[in-house]
């Protein structure tokens, strides 16, 4: 009988526990033990990571999690190729062949127990980054801030904020996440400030007087009264008003776009044409366009990002000792995906793009050679710019 382990203060795995395989499925350890006893653990295999379908019928996804996967497998006697982090890809080529997004080759014993965490890195990160990119595409050039940290375990905050940033969002809210990205966290006030101060007028007056000068004054205008009423109070009390945020609960929304229009009118009427209107609360790529059309200048998007559906990647052996070997339902043998330099279409073994006739180029980059770094990993700003460039002309 397994003894009871010591209680943890927070239920998170340490880097050391991940590296030692303690977050891996036990059957990999048992498989490795059997292979060692059978003298087959050094058998050379090629494993490809693919996905059969994307969540919610997404036409494309953003590949993410590469850096963590490379960091975990560094030092192992394996070669690793992957799409560059931030690459937009479809699940399958026009011919219906799943696109390999990450490939590992080497003795199976070198990486057997790490399949679980590698998939975890890729599946969750790609889901969040994709949702962020879809929100970015829906919002156009309007500012989008991540509000989703409170919906997930705090240990995931750095992961979530990195993923939403590289996916195209403009800002994050936690000191840790922002520092990791080399940015400043953003945020002004919660409803609690209005309640503790005794009302919106008192809260806005205190905000004007006591908030650090460098922080833009954005008033949360929906705690007790109509959004238009509180926005007018904010205009009266905050001479440096940078904007208002509308976080109207769903039970009070009615025609939310019309509320935005009314607030815009009242602010303009009082000389606050430059004060921006931010909208938050239950937003995603489907609800943003109508609010943007109504005049919203920015969005705070939370749960739909942090709770994004995962991309259901699988890792499968497709070669054994250099010969094709794959389970039923999978395509055996090494696939070298090519990507059109013009439209981004993927295909296997094509000389010209099947979609536009453009030039095809190798899609995978070799990041590890015998476990040693073979290519520099880009930083979050470079990945974000790469994603934004690919998003041009795309719809969510």
Image (tube, rainbow, N blue to C red):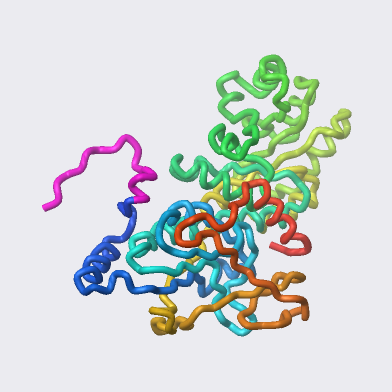
- Up the image or down, 61 lies above or below 5; here it is below
Question: Which one is in front, 21 or 289?
Answer: 21
| Residue depicted at x 34% and y 42% | 11
Where is residue 84 shown, x and y percent of the image?
A: 61, 60
- Up the image or down, 200 lies above or below 394; here it is above
Asked if residue 216 lies in the magenta stretch, the reply is no
| Residue depicted at x 65% and y 64% | 88
Question: Which one is in front, 289 or 24?
Answer: 24
Write down the region rendered in magenta: 1-19
- Up the image or down, 23 lies above or below 280; here it is below
Picture quadrant of residue 131:
bottom right
Question: Which one is in front, 100 or 159?
Answer: 100
Evaluate whether residue 359 shows in this view: yes
Where is residue 369 shown, x and y percent of the image?
A: 50, 62
Picture quadrant of residue 216:
top right
Asked if residue 14 lies in the magenta stretch, the reply is yes
Where is residue 335 shown, x and y percent of the image?
A: 54, 78
| Residue depicted at x 48% and y 82% | 333
Where is residue 57 shown, x and y percent of the image?
A: 59, 70
Taking the view exactly as shown, the residue that stands out farthest to the top is 209
Name the chief secondary structure element in magenta.
loop
Horizontal relation, residue 105 to residue 97: left or right: left
Horizontal relation, residue 219 to residue 128: left or right: right
């Amino acid at each position: 009988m397994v003894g009871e382990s010591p209680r943890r203060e927070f239920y998170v795995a340490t880097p050391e526990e991940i590296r030692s395989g303690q977050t891996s499925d036990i059957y990999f350890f048992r498989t490795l033990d059997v292979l060692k006893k059978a003298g087959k653990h050094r058998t050379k295999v090629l494993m490809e990571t693919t996905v059969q379908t994307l969540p919610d019928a997404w036409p494309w996804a953003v590949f993410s999690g590469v850096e963590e996967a490379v960091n975990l497998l560094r030092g192992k006697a394996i070669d690793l190729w992957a799409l560059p982090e931030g690459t937009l890809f479809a699940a399958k080529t026009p011919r219906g062949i799943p696109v390999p997004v990450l490939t590992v080759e080497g003795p199976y014993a070198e990486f057997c127990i790490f399949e679980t965490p590698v998939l975890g890195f890729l599946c969750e990160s790609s889901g969040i980054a994709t949702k962020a990119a879809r929100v970015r595409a829906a919002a156009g050039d309007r500012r989008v801030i991540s509000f989703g940290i409170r919906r997930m375990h705090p240990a995931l905050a750095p992961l979530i904020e990195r993923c939403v940033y590289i996916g195209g969002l403009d800002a994050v809210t936690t000191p840790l996440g922002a520092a990791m990205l080399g940015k400043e966290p953003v945020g002004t006030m919660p409803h609690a400030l209005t309640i503790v101060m005794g009302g919106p007028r008192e809260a806005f007056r205190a905000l004007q007087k006591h908030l650090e000068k460098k922080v833009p004054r954005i008033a949360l205008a929906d705690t007790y009264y109509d959004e238009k009423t509180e926005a007018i109070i904010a205009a009266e009390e905050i001479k440096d008003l940078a904007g208002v945020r509308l976080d109207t609960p769903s039970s009070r929304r009615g025609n939310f776009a019309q509320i935005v229009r009314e607030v815009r009118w009242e602010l303009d009427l009082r000389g606050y044409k430059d004060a921006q209107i931010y909208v938050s609360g239950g937003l995603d790529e489907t609800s943003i366009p109508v609010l943007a059309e109504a005049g919203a200048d920015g969005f705070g998007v939370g749960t739909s990002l942090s709770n994004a559906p995962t991309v259901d990647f699988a890792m499968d052996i497709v070669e054994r000792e250099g010969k094709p070997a794959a389970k039923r339902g999978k395509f055996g043998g090494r696939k070298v995906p090519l990507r059109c330099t013009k439209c981004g279409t993927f295909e296997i073994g094509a000389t010209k793009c099947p979609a536009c006739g453009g030039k095809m180029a190798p899609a995978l980059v070799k990041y590890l050679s015998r476990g040693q770094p073979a290519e520099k990993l880009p930083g979050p700003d470079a990945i974000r710019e790469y994603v934004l460039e690919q998003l041009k002309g795309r719809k969510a």
